[in-house]
Amino acid sequence: MVRSGEKINSATGALYNSRLLKFCDNYAREKYPQLHLEPVYQAAGIRKYEIDDPGHWFTQDQSDRYYFALMDMCGNPEFAREAGRYVIRSKEMWVVRQFILGMVSPSAFFSTIERHYTKVSRGVHATARLTGKESAEMICHPAPGTNTKAYQCEVCVGILEAVGLLFTNAFAHVVHTECVHEGGEACRFEVTWSAAPSVVWRRIRNRAFLVGTPLAFGLATFVKTPSVLLVSFVLLLVMAALSFVAHHKREEELLNIIQAQGNYAGDLFEDDNIRNRHALLIKSISQEAALTDSQEGVAQGVINVMDRHLDYDRIAFFFYDEDRLRLAFQVGYTPVQVAHFKDSGDRVWKTEAMRRVLEKKENLVINGVKGYSETSLFGPEFPDVQDLEGLLAVPVSMEGRVSGVLVAANVPGKRALTQGDLSLLIGVASQVGLSIDNVVKRRELAERELRYRKQVQKGLEDERRRIAFDLHDHVAQDLGSLVITARMMQEKAAQKEEALAEDLHAFVTVLKGAIDSVRNIAYDLQPPSLAQFGLVHTIQVYATDYSDKHGVEVDFRAAGVQEELLEYDTMINFFRIVQESLTNIFKHAYADKVSIRLVFSHPNLILRIRDNGKGFSPHAVESGPVSGRHMGLRNMEERARLMKGSFRIYSSPDKGCEIVVEVPLDRDVMKEPDGMNPATHHTSQR
């Protein structure tokens, strides 16, 4: 069986619709009722339900083995041609028959055959042209890599002969003038057919009028004897009768065509209804999944919708996590079976059939196998075993990996499951995978947003504590000292002591310190030079102050940065990343050298910060709790994400650390410079 999802190609793929085998199957049963065709199916490697499924397609090899086995069993060398003629009477090709009749005439049929031939065969490219009023030529080119057989030519001859029978009540005359199996480049068929009855009667009528009308009027005019007048009258009656018969025949043919077109339209309408119902089913599943925020809720909603709209006896959805299958929701299974699913998930998925679904991502379709039960899928220990009429199992994929299995089954007495059911279940599985993926992403987004809010809140609280600490330990103490000094100065001034000048000097010194503390606090909150002098200058000043304060050599260089085109939000985020990184280096890395590079490489602005400190394991940071260095790194990562950029860490214990931030800039805002600006190079060292 060709499984859904396999690539179809001319050499090994599915080429022939099941209808081409079905009408041969029915012809053999009608003409040779004593035959049992199960050995033919086994020889071809196909199943009866596959032939009955109008949506199924067979390979060249399956078709060959089926026909050869069937012809050997029948013992009739003309079987292929006779089966082709049977297509007009076959129930399975009734839709094709109605379609052909809807073409009004054989000429119209051959004019449109190229468009419609692919509905039953992908192995041959067919073209046709009219060579006369009642003749046509059909040319069949095998698809590249397809190894067609001679019996297929015989089937084609029989079908072409039968087309004439529909319109003229006589088989068309077909001559196979060229064949690929005899060295030809293509198979060429010359088809001629008799005129339709209405056409024949119209021709007789026209000729009768052409001869009889002048004769009748001439006799009546020049020979006015009673017998001659009677003959003239009879001639006129005959011509009138011929006109009536021709008109009646044409009406019959038109009524048949109208009825055929109506039946064909009804079939198309029913097919369209089925497709609409399936589309509504997928839509209902999507809407049901959108109402839940859990994977289990998605599974329950999907199974409930399928149970309401479809006629399956059993439906189940399992989650798969590479260790075991876990039942999410089911309909139709007994309590004992449900308990078995919950207790034995690891044993369930180890069956060969389930391995094919989970590991090879195959779609499993099994129908009409006597004695077949769900033990082949769920294992020999599966309880309450019951034979099945059909079983489908489809993998549910999420981001390229199998995350679950969707199973549907019918018990004996119900209909077999067809290719249409498989296609529908594949569509449902695709929607389920998408819905589960959306639920997971929504949950991750909500968790990330919660973590970010916590980080922002903690950052605000830390900033408030730092400001309070700076105000209390620096500004408040300095101001308190100034108050004491001022009172002492008041007392000395009252006593006119000479030490007043020294106290005034100390007062000014403390006052300057308080002013510097306030300025430092304000600078940390909002660097004033950023908007005025730009990002490069602000980082340079901060790096110099950092170096002077902590005794760390900071080497800062910038190249290609057009600061006048940078948005303020971009500049403040890059500055905060530098600020946070240098703070982390001082608190945790104990480095004595830091390198900072800010470079524009179209279309990205790239920041690299490297130190020679003690380093760390980035994996431990990603999986560890949010605290200390971890929070600083995550704050930097979140800032990069807000700018739609990337944030990467390269570090290992005792080998320092490098942070790379790469942010894409708007192409319309940040243009590629004509040439690389001279590098701005600042080395700050105490």
Image (cartoon, rainbow, N blue to C red):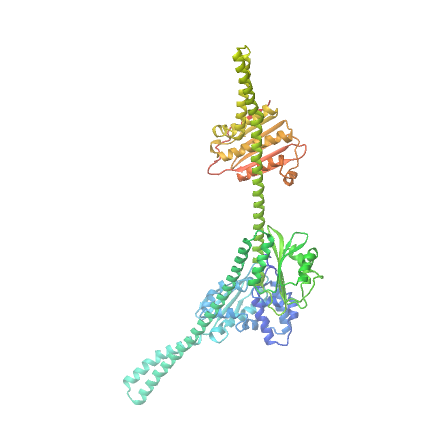
Residue 365, relative to residue 466: is it above or below? below
Q: Is residue 497 left or right of residue 250?
A: right
Say which quarter of the image contains residue 51: bottom right
Q: Quadrant of the N terminus?
A: bottom right
Q: Is residue 484 left or right of residue 383?
A: left
Residue drawn at (42%, 73%), measured in percent from left and top? 254
**Residue 668 locus on image (x, y percent):** 46, 38
- Res 299 visible: yes
Say which quarter of the image contains residue 150: bottom right
Residue 12, relative to residue 581: is it above or below? below
Q: Quadrant of the C terminus?
A: top right
Q: Give the residue at the far right of this rendering.
A: 381
**Residue 353 locus on image (x, y percent):** 67, 59
**Residue 517 locus on image (x, y percent):** 55, 24
Considering depth in this image, is 451 or 185 the residue closer to the camera? 451
Q: Give the residue at the far bottom of this rendering.
A: 226
Considering depth in this image, is 495 or 284 the residue closer to the camera? 495
Residue drawn at (30%, 84%), measured in percent from left and top? 219
Residue 507, relative to residue 313: is it above or below? above
Residue drawn at (70%, 60%), measured in percent from left and top? 379
- Res 679 visible: no
